[in-house]
Image (spheres, rainbow, N blue to C red):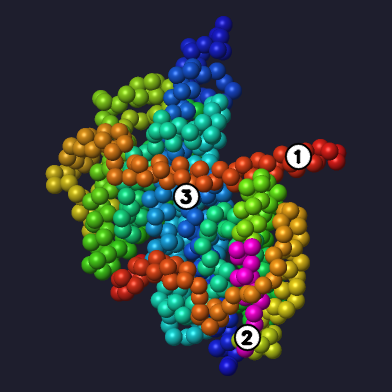
């Protein structure tokens, strides 16, 4: 594998996480528990889509076949998307949305802090822009985890359920394959081993503070690096790609 | 000597073009009128998030999705400032929301129409926000200070909304036959309801006279509607959209367009609750408000616990 091919795949993976999470959060518009929260979640969605645009544009540039960010976002088959399984999980109740945000944003904070040091200048530049946004996403998720965990008995129960339900998708965040190995040799990719340990620590601290229990590590779901997703992704794509697929000659 | 708490003194301040502030004396009728109008305006922003939100997940490009998300976020933000402006008049947000959900308070009837194809997002921005701006520009000079200041801020964002709506319509009219058909379909469905947004003719408007005297309202429904018509017809023609009115004409002498009579039966029917989406919009608001109750309760409980802890350790 050339560095170029590996960088393309690596960028696509990051771009797909941002694209699909941005989509999931955008589903919540006008559905927040309070107007302020509607605005906050929309804000996170906007950041995600902005990040997706930057990353997918870079992926298209690396590929060099004259595609646009939109071609990549809207014109692939399900098996070619490589977002993590956690990202595509449904919003569920507000506790599930927050648990997913907590797991993802703590991971992204650690990840993008390292990616800022990447020898790939474009990825490093995207990382330094995005890290400012992630700090806010993470604070938002932590604040709500504390409120829900240490709020009422109902909110505590719902938050614990959400943490437990999504736990099996968290292991995949730290998987590495030959793409990572190649790019780590080139000083481009982030080593996920130290990040995994730090993530566990940070999550444990937040959950403890929120009076929640850290789930036991059982079997971790896997597959997205090979394009094997949960059933959720197909539904996301059929909605997201509707106009692009129904009117392939149109420009919007 | 003037009594600062008299209606005469109040009216002389209005006549001098002064702003009335939250703590100033105001007649009860003025306060009531403002609460009704500002809350209706706030509710319109919030309910308006629904028809547009209906297309977010199907927005056809990353750029379109970002613009639409940003726009809906602005609408929610406008709802927040307006609820705050209403609160300065001694009413709580909880009461305002209760009135919305019980049907006691209204919101702009335009949002009782469905957003059926992507061009509807263009039409909502261009026509609906376009009509709203004409009204809001005028309200920047409204006599109540907090409302006037909210309008100044809102107008800046609304003009961006209108431009993005017109951009969608323009792109679609320059696009494929299917896209042109969608744009015209949206025009056909949104044109008349957007003209109804200005409310009944001046001769039939129940709230106009006091509102004009108190300078809450600076221009009449018909004056504002005419401004919108005169501005919008040339924009439609420029991109090749047909106005869904067989009898409109330009009066060369006055420079104003004349249009066919507005179907007021439809207007009153939708206001009375029988529009295509009245029930859906309010039900949606109630559903997510109720589903969010446990979250709001948790936030309150958490705050109480932690305030108590801080007091104990202090």
2 and 3 marks in contact (CB < 8 Å):
no
User: Where residue A72 sits: x, y (%)?
Assistant: 45, 77
Q: Residues within 10 Å of mark 2 (few under 14, many from 20)?
A: few
Task: Give the left or right position of residue B231, taking residue A134 as reference.
Answer: left
Residue at the right extreme, as displayed: B314
In the rendered structure, find residue B307 and report the number of the disc placed on it: 1
Within 10 angstroms of label 3, few (less than 14), some, or many (20 or more) residues? Answer: many
User: Residue at left 64%, top 45%?
Assistant: B298
Mark sitting on residue A177: 2
The residue closer to the viewer here, B285 or B82, is B285
Classify mark 3: helix, strand or loop.
Answer: loop
**Chain bearing mark 2:** A
Q: Is residue A123 left or right of residue B241?
A: right
- Disc 3 designates what residue? A30
Asked if A103 appears above or below A125 in the picture, the reply is: above
Closest to the observer: A191 or B199? A191
Q: Residue at 53% across / 24% down in the picture?
A: B20
- Residue at the image position 42 percent from the left and 33 percent from the top: B102
The part of the chain drawn in magenta is: A164-178
Q: Is residue B101 magenta?
A: no
Q: Position of residue B238 (x, y in %)?
A: 26, 56
Q: CA distance from mark 1 to mark 2?
A: 48 Å
């Amino acid at each position: 594998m050339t560095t170029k091919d590996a960088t393309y795949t690596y960028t696509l993976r990051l771009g797909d996480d941002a694209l699909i999470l941005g989509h999931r959060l955008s589903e919540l518009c006008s559905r927040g528990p309070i107007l302020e929260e509607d605005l906050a979640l929309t804000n996170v969605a906007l950041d995600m889509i902005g990040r997706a645009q930057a990353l997918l544009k870079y992926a298209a540039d690396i590929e060099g076949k004259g595609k646009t960010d939109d071609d990549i976002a809207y014109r692939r088959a399900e098996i070619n998307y490589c977002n993590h399984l956690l990202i595509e999980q449904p919003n569920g109740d507000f506790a599930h949305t927050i648990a997913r945000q907590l797991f993802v944003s703590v991971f992204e904070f650690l990840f993008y802090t390292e990616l800022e040091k990447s020898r790939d200048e474009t990825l490093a530049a995207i990382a330094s822009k995005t890290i400012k946004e992630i700090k806010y996403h993470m604070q938002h998720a932590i604040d709500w985890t504390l409120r829900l965990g240490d709020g009422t008995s109902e909110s505590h129960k719902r938050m614990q359920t959400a943490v437990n339900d999504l736990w099996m998708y968290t292991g995949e965040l730290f998987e590495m394959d030959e793409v990572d190995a190649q790019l780590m040799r080139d000083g481009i990719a982030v080593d996920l081993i130290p990040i995994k340990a730090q993530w566990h620590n940070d999550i444990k601290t937040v959950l403890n503070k929120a009076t929640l229990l850290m789930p036991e590590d059982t079997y971790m779901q896997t597959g997205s690096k090979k394009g094997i997703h949960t059933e959720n992704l197909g539904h996301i794509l059929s909605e997201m790609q509707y106009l692009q697929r129904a009117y392939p000659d149109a420009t919007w | 000597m003037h009594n600062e708490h008299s209606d005469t003194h109040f009216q002389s301040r209005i006549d001098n073009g002064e702003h009335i502030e939250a703590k100033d004396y105001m007649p009860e009728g003025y306060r009531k009128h403002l609460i009704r109008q500002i809350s209706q305006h706030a509710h319109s922003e919030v309910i308006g998030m629904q028809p547009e939100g209906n297309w977010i997940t199907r927005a056809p490009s990353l750029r379109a999705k970002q613009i639409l998300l940003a726009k809906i976020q602005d609408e929610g933000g406008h709802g927040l400032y307006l609820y705050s402006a209403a609160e300065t008049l001694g009413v709580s947000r909880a009461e305002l929301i209760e009135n919305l959900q019980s049907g006691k308070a209204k919101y702009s009837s335009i949002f009782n129409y469905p957003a059926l194809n992507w061009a509807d997002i263009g039409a909502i921005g261009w026509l609906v926000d376009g009509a709203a701006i004409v009204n809001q520009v005028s309200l920047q000079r409204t006599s109540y200070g907090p409302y006037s200041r909210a309008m100044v801020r809102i107008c800046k964002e609304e003009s961006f909304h209108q431009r993005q709506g017109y951009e969608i319509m323009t792109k679609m009219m320059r696009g494929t036959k299917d896209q042109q058909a969608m744009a015209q379909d949206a025009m056909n469905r949104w044109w008349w309801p957007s003209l109804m947004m200005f409310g009944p003719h001046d001769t039939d408007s129940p709230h106009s006279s006091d509102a004009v005297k108190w300078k809450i309202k600076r221009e009449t429904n018909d004056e504002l509607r005419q401004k919108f018509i005169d501005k919008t017809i040339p924009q439609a023609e420029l991109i090749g959209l047909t106005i869904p009115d067989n009898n409109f004409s330009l009066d060369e002498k006055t420079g104003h367009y004349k249009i066919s009579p507005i179907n007021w039966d439809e207007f009153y029917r939708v206001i009375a609750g029988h529009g295509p989406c009245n029930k859906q919009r309010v039900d949606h608001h109630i559903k997510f408000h109720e589903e969010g109750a446990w979250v709001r309760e948790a936030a309150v409980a958490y705050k109480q616990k932690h305030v108590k802890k801080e007091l104990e350790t202090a």
